[in-house]
Image (tube, coloured by chain):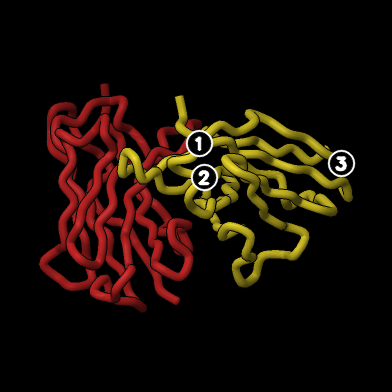
Amino acid sequence: QGTLWESGPALVKATQTLTLTCTFSGFSLDTTGMCLIWIRQPPGKALEWLARIDWDGDVYYNTSLKTRLTLSRGSSKTQVALTMTNMDPVDTATYFCARTHSVVYPTIDLWGRGTLVTVPA
Amino acid sequence: QSALTQEASVSGTVGQKVTLTCIGNSNNIGTYDVGWYQQISPGSPKTVMFGDSLPSGIPDRFSGSKSATTASLTISGLQPEDEADYYCSTWDHSRSVWVFGGGTKLTVL
């Protein structure tokens, strides 16, 4: 089945760089068709897709945030890391890691619990 | 403005059938299955529909369908625990981006 959990700082100052880690278990990102996705949700607002990394190393980014985002496989084979530069108060949100794979693509079948990141004004 | 269009709010009484819609275009919904996600704040989203397939553990009062560039989530026999925000999403191949709807707040009266 699998599990996902997000980790990173709860508080980030404006202009700093945020680094979030998604640690996963119960599946391999090397499996053909596997994808991990980052999504965020500002308080009281809708879900917003940030980035996607595929089993073959392909990475895709939200067009509006592309210049600020980097998604990569972590040092461990069970982690991916998302960095977002030049943080701003409008980036305050809960950040979710999620999974899709070829059987259900492009629907998401597994969600992390999310991690709240606050950027004070 | 979200790439997929959903009703801002829908309401229904217990036992009623309600349908939520998600409107896209040929590059997203017209090509791919749509996922539906239920979110009861302050929790994380939960997948309630893969296209027209029900994930394990989701009651069969939930059903999904699609016609051209519009996807629908129908809840037959609405229950109080169905009150939540519902989001739709899929992939857009023309822009290579994941797209979400703005969400529908479902209220059970």
Left/right placement of residue B106 relative to residue A87 reads right
| Quadrant in which residue A110 is drawn | bottom left
Q: Mark 3 sits on what residue?
A: B13
Say which label, 3 or 1, has the lower sequence index: 3
Locate the N terminus of chain B and report the quarter of the image it occupies: top left
Question: Do marks 3 and 1 share a chain?
Answer: yes
Instruction: Choose between B78 and A9: the one closer to the eye.
Output: B78
Q: Residue, x 81% and y 53% (percent of image)?
A: B76
On the question of residue A117 being in view, the answer is yes
Q: What is the x, y in percent for residue A109?
A: 48, 63
Sort mark 2 into few (<14), some (14-19) or many (20+) by Cα contacts within 10 Å.
many
Q: Residue, x 52% and y 51% (percent of image)?
A: B45
Q: Residue, x 52% and y 45% (percent of image)?
A: B30
Query: Which of the numbered marks, if any, corresponds to residue B29?
Result: 2
Q: What is the x, y in percent for residue A49?
A: 36, 42
Alpha carbon separation for disc pair 3 and 2: 29 Å
Q: Mark 1 sits on what residue?
A: B25
Which residue type carries mark 2? Ile
Considering the numbered disc 3 on the image, is that residue within a helix, a strand or a loop? loop
Drawing shade for chain B: yellow
Marks 2/1 in contact by CB < 8 Å: the verdict is yes
Q: Chain of mark 2?
A: B
Considering the numbered disc 1 on the image, is that residue within a helix, a strand or a loop? loop
Left/right placement of residue A109 relative to residue A90 reads right
Instruction: Choose between A56 and B79: the one closer to the eye.
Output: A56
Chain identifier, colour red: A
Question: Do marks 2 and 1 share a chain?
Answer: yes
Q: What is the x, y in percent for residue B95?
A: 32, 38
On the question of residue A116 being in view, the answer is no
Q: Residue, x 46% and y 48% (percent of image)?
A: B90
